[in-house]
Amino acid sequence: MALLNSEDWYDIARDTNWTPRYVSEQALFPKELSDVLEMPLELLETFDEPYKVTYRDYVKTQREKDVGAYSVKAALARSQMYENASPGWKALLQMHFGAVSFLEYHSVSAFARMTRFGRAPGMRNMATFGSLDEMRHAQVHLYFAYEYLAKSRTFDWAQKAPRTDNWVIISERHTFDDLEHTRDAISAAIMTNFAFETAFTNLQFIALSADAANCGDFSFSTMLQSIQSDEARHAQIGEPLLKMMIDSGRKAEAQKLIDISFWRCWKQFSALSGTCMDYYTPLDKREGSFKEFMNEWILDQFVAKLEDMGMEKPWYWDLLLEDIEVFHHAQQLGIYLYRPTEWWHPIAGTNPAERAWLEEKYPGWNDTFGQVWDVIIENIRAGRLDSTIPKTLPMLCNMHGLELTGVPGRKWNLKDHTLDYQGRRYHFQSVVDKWIFEQEPERYAGHLSLIDRVAQGIVAPDGVMEHMNMAPEEYGIEGTNYAWVEAYDDALTTRRATGT
Amino acid sequence: MNTATNGLKTWTTLAGGRRRPTEYEVVSYNLHTRTRHPGYAYELSPELFMNRFYREHVGGSVLQHPDWDAFRDPDELIYRQYNVLQDGHEEYVDGLLEEHARNEHDLALDPAWLKGLPRLYTAARYPLHALQMAAAYVVQMAPASTITNCAAFQGADQYRWISRLAYRTRELQVACPDLGFGAERALWEDDPAWQGFRELLEKLLATYDWGEHVIALNVVAKPAFDLCRCRQLARAARDAGDTLTAMLLEAEWRDSERSQRWTQALVALTLQHAPNDAAIATILARWQPLADTAIDAWCAALPGVPEAAAAVKRGLRELQQACGVQPA
Ligand SMILES: [Fe+2]
Ligand SMILES: [Fe+2]
């Protein structure tokens, strides 16, 4: 008798659904947790996971992967990579570990919800591995961050962030709690696995990983790629569910879930990855611009995938294409100016050479964002460092939770989209953010942004830093100690000499 | 002004301890963000369904503790060690299967014993899956990351044994095509031997108070189920000359023992908070009778082990006593 192949018994291992007798179906699978759309069970039971892995193979493969990921780390612990890194790369690592580690861990619970409330055994089994994967991602992040902690306390945020009300963390939670954590298992899988993981994790794990390798940060690069190999597997939980929704006449509902999720992810990745790629990564190490990467790896691939499934591009596609030109540039300004409120040490990334690159990649940058940077440069050069830090809090969007920004300069176009709902005024960055709110106001209306908390007297204006759980020694400081403006001394001298 | 660039020895949340934090603590301790605010687990309207759900079932649970994050897994298991551990154990199981297949083990089994295996042995993939789902509920509700992690490993272990059971089901189906291997759903749904466990597990899955759920699962239902199979069925299998079934169940018991270890630690922590004493007693009083009925019904179907039910109940009470609770 020979050993069996996994195909011989795999179907038996996922033949585990039964009809409950001692409690009702509804008690076992409340629709708010399982499937608000109440698709027929016979349909849901046809779930066939595209990426099959057995338990036996899972523990073996993951064991081997970890040997790779952790051994690079051991070699790097001895190197001086961090000490020798540019201030921008340091800022990127500090921000990344604080912003990402807790989200990875948070996702353990999201997959567990699919394991418990999914209606097909195959989905539940793959989500069981999903929970473990996310634990892996959290633990490898924490392990790496702990190495860096000895060099900089900013890495404490890799562990601390989830327990804080820092505005960046609030913004992330508002987004990912919306997509991953507060919906029924099927909607969450469409929004998380299909829209977020399939579409966006490439940005972190391919673009960022390439930049990391260029910078000689091989431990970070290897870690990101290793994580991506798990994402590529568990992200596939979403697709069969999407197909079921389409096949059962629920395409419009599916489209809405995707449209909401894609936009919300876009805002997060734009603010956090966009700034890293176009400002923090050293100029000579950049693989491409954020916009180029978005177009090639995110938009084209995602649209192809959507069309392949018979879905449409999100309705706001033209607005998205406009936003790709500007949003992260505006956020970069805000992040730089409000640096004390961040756990990392932001840099400007706008010396003359970097500006030339930005102008080339984003024509018109100098006439818009560049003008604000000119004022900042002037203030720094004049020693007026205080005037580069705003005294008042920024307006925050009631959807994406980031600063409400527009495009400054000749065509300043900050437009606050407001909505009055049940006696309260809400502010949105764009018609899309407002549209998301309008789809289900009661989901969002009760939430208070940091600014709302101050406006309502819940947080005293001088208690904001404390409310964000930021001790004075944690206030973000300028990552280069303003050294970057020195390049402008030369530029100015040259300009004066040549009379231009 | 660059004073903030100094490093730290450990996470601020672990600073001040008497000893250096272990790697386990560094990557496992105090990681949940959904426990941050008692009013809303999620950063959306406090009145959103899911926020009410966590408020009711975690915040308002029958079990309360001022510091759930004080929980530590006695095995200090982290993800990468879990894979190393289980990869090794799976290799052992591969060896068992290979060796027994080579010796044509199944063909030598007593026909009467074989005939009972779909009911006694392979039908268990359904309750194992119920336990997998129940563990996932603990994963998503537990108010401490150290508890969540233990439950995540436990849930994966359940799927581990479903997989091995599926493997054996197929193998036995090939060896004995007429005995109903692979068609066990009806047995799980209708056979009197299983109805006790079915009732226990269905009611457990529909229990959403996180504290009641974890106690009913790990102090009552899972150990009762595991004792029936991994101890009593394993015994019967040995007596019947079915060494493969016996050895697989004994291997499964090792995972069950890990579950018992963290369960003991969890209950010990829980009992530090005095009011939980009565709460646990109430939970046991509610669930133990269901478990006893399940044990009686299942053991009655086990041939050649007349004392099985008594042995399981004794074993269960010992485990509960080891947890520091008085069995109901
Ligand atoms: Fe992840
Ligand atoms: Fe993921």
Image (spheres, grey):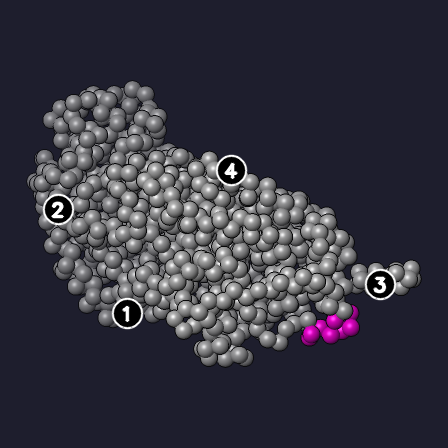
Distance Cα–Cα, label 1 vs label 2: 33 Å
> Which residue is denoted by mark 1 in the rendering?
B273
Name the chain under label 3. A
Q: Please check whether the numbered discs 3 and 1 fall on a single chain.
A: no
* Tag of residue A60: none
In the image, residue B159 lies at what x, y percent?
Answer: 31, 41
Q: Is residue B202 left or right of residue A368?
A: left
Q: Nearer the viewer, mark 2 or mark 3?
A: 3
**Judging from the image, what secondary structure is the residue with disc 2 in?**
helix
> Which residue is denoted by mark 4 in the rendering?
A304
> Which residue is denoted by mark 2 in the rendering?
B196
Distance Cα–Cα, label 2 vs label 4: 51 Å
Q: Nearer the viewer, mark 4 or mark 3?
A: 4
Q: Nearer the viewer, residue A485 or A420?
A: A420
Quadrant hosting residue A350 = bottom right
Q: Please check whether the numbered discs 1 and 2 fall on a single chain.
A: yes
Q: Which residues are magenta?
A: A379-387
- Residue B227 seen from this side: no
Instruction: Please report whichever mark, 1 or 2, sits nearer to the chain's N-terminal start.
Output: 2
Asked if residue B101 is among those painted magenta in the image, a careful observer would answer: no
In the image, residue A330 lies at what x, y percent?
Answer: 62, 60
Name the chain under label 2. B
Q: Mark 3 near mark 1, Cβ–Cβ under 8 Å?
A: no
Ligand 2 under 8 Å from disc 4 Cβ = no
